[in-house]
Amino acid sequence: MSKRDYYEILGVSKDVSEKELKKAYRRVAMKYHPDRNPGDKEAEDKFKEASEAYEVLADAQKRAAYDQYGHAGVEGAGGMGGGGFGGGGFSDIFGDVFGDIFGGGGGGRGGPARGADLRYNLDLSLEEAVKGKTVKIKVPTLVACSPCGGSGAKPGSSPTTCTTCGGHGQVRMQQGFFSVQQTCPTCRGKGKMISDPCSSCHGQGRVEETKTLSVKVPPGVDTGDRIRLSGEGEAGADGGPAGDLYVQVHVREHEFFQRDGKNLYCEVPISIFEACLGGEIEVPTLDGRVKLRVPPETQTGKLFRLRGKGVSSVRGGAPGDLMCRVVLETPVNLNKEQKDLLEKLRDSMKGKQHSPRQESWFEGMKNFFGDMKL
Ligand SMILES: [Zn+2]
Ligand SMILES: [Zn+2]
């Protein structure tokens, strides 16, 4: 049998680069791949021929031998004993070239594929996230078709074993010296054929349905937490196992509180009188209002810690704290009398040590400009 020239088979010139060679092989291989030409003997032969050509030309050593001696140069080296080329190298090339064309081979081994996992975004208020709750959610999904029980075959009939692969889903193909395992082109790896498809699912074994599910949200969840509902994802094709449903928690912003792990933060405005004289103010917590003692001469921005008034983690442990930041509010809408009183107060404080921070700040500023020799 006279063999065609390897370069001619792949439609490339003798000085083809490695990259161009791979491209050319992909083009030819995709065209004649058995998955795309089921039952076409000529395409199968062309596919084998191209694979063999690429096998040789992709290897610098073998390519050199082929360039010098032609087919004799590489056949002699290979032999039937399994030495020479082949072995690990071939599958490497194969995986490399086909990985991105056929999605990594997509083998049909190990029974029907598992259904896809689903994700559901669940919005919760802070209170709901902290206390936990059971929510009903509606999830559009694929469920096993009930008339056929997911098999895809008309009720009363059942899928038959694929005669091409004998139910294995894989066939062995001879390629030059090598026997390569491939997805069965007849059943596409399923190992079964449906001659009489179910009319409800058209042989798919799955139908679209909106499922209503009850999700138990444990207390303490936070944005980014996921709750897994095992087996509530899409049903698998051909009666395969269902995937999982992941409920992704997102906690909405709260009017008063910011959450940071187990701690809560809030800002509480206080008047100049409470700040100066001290007093009791009311602060919000998730369990209602509590009183907070503000000592006299409290500065704005001071943080008060209320132990245990934070949040318990979903992972357990002691609850965190509530951190209250008091913010001094400047009085507005003052009348003449009030302004007079304030002026009186100001005059009485003049020249005395009532604002240590302001004084040291001005002192610092003086030094700063002094250093600059202004
Ligand atoms: Zn088959
Ligand atoms: Zn069905």
Image: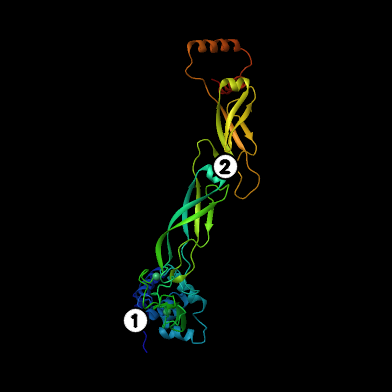
> Depth check: 158 or 123 in front?
158
Q: What residue sits right under mark 2 in the picture? A: 260
Residue 77, percent from left and from top: 48, 84
As drawn, the label of residue 2 is: none
Q: Amino acid at mark 1?
A: Asp
Would you say 39 lies left or right of 332 here? left
Q: Amino acid at mark 2?
A: Asp
Q: Which of marks 1 and 2 precedes in the sequence?
A: 1
> Which residue is pictured at 62% across the width and 23% down the height?
279
Instruction: Report whether the residue tagged 2 is closer than 8 Å to ligand 2.
Output: no
Circle 1 packing at 10 Å, graded few (<14), some (14-19), many (20+), is few
Residue 269, percent from left and from top: 54, 27
Residue 121, percent from left and from top: 47, 51
Image vertical order of residue 302 relative to residue 46, above or below: above
Would you say 294 lies left or right of 69 here? right
> Which residue is pictured at 51% across the width and 79% down the height?
87
> Depth check: 47 or 75 in front?
47
Tally the marks.
2
Quadrant holding the N terminus: bottom left
The answer to whether residue 284 of the structure is visible from this angle is yes
**Quadrant hosting residue 364:** top right
As drawn, the label of residue 40 is: 1
Asked which secondary structure carries label 2, the reply is: strand
Q: Which mark is in front, 2 or 1?
A: 2
The answer to whether residue 366 of the structure is visible from this angle is no
Distance in Å between CA atoms under marks 2 and 1: 64 Å
Check if mark 2's residue and mark 1's residue have beta carbons within 8 Å.
no
Image vertical order of residue 223 relative to residue 88, above or below: above
